[in-house]
Image: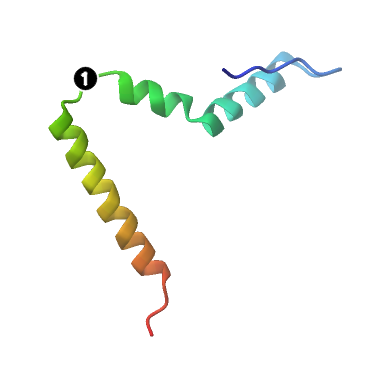
Amino acid sequence: MVFVKLREGETVEEALRRFKRECERNGILREIKRREHYASPSVKRKLKAAEARRKMRRARRRRPAA
């Protein structure tokens, strides 16, 4: 749960910006989108494998060739 207390002399707009930033940091919107639709176990496995492949490719690009 994300809480933002209004600081001394802070406008509501500034507090709202801080709240949105905290939600982004905590991955709340990503979690809401993920839970929006049911995904069968086979679809979850495919997504997880695709994510692993993407991470491996990214790691290979960052590592300098010897």
Seen from the viewer's position, the closer of residues 29 and 42 is 42
Place of residue 9 in the rendered image (x, y in percent of width and height, measured from the top left): 85, 18
Place of residue 39 in the rendered image (x, y in percent of width and height, measured from the top left): 19, 25
Q: Residue furthest left?
A: 42
Left or right: residue 21 versus residue 51 is right
Q: Quadrant of residue 36?
A: top left
Left or right: residue 29 versus residue 16 is left
Amino acid type of disc 1?
Tyr
Instruction: Residue under label 1, please give it.
Output: 38
**Residue at point 36%, 68% (across, down):** 61
Left or right: residue 36 versus residue 20 is left
Q: Residue furthest bottom?
A: 66
Q: Residue furthest right?
A: 8
Q: Quadrant of residue 18?
A: top right
| Quadrant where the image shows the N terminus | top right
| Secondary element at image label 1 | loop
Sort mark 1 into few (<14), some (14-19) or many (20+) by Cα contacts within 10 Å. Answer: few
**Residue at point 60%, 19% (across, down):** 2
Marks counted in the figure total: 1
Place of residue 59 in the rendered image (x, y in percent of width and height, measured from the top left): 38, 63
Left or right: residue 45 versus residue 55 is left
Q: How is the image coloured?
A: rainbow
**Residue at point 55%, 33% (across, down):** 25
| Quadrant where the image shows the C terminus | bottom left
Place of residue 55 in the rendered image (x, y in percent of width and height, measured from the top left): 34, 55
Q: In the rendered view, would you say 5 is above or below 18?
A: above
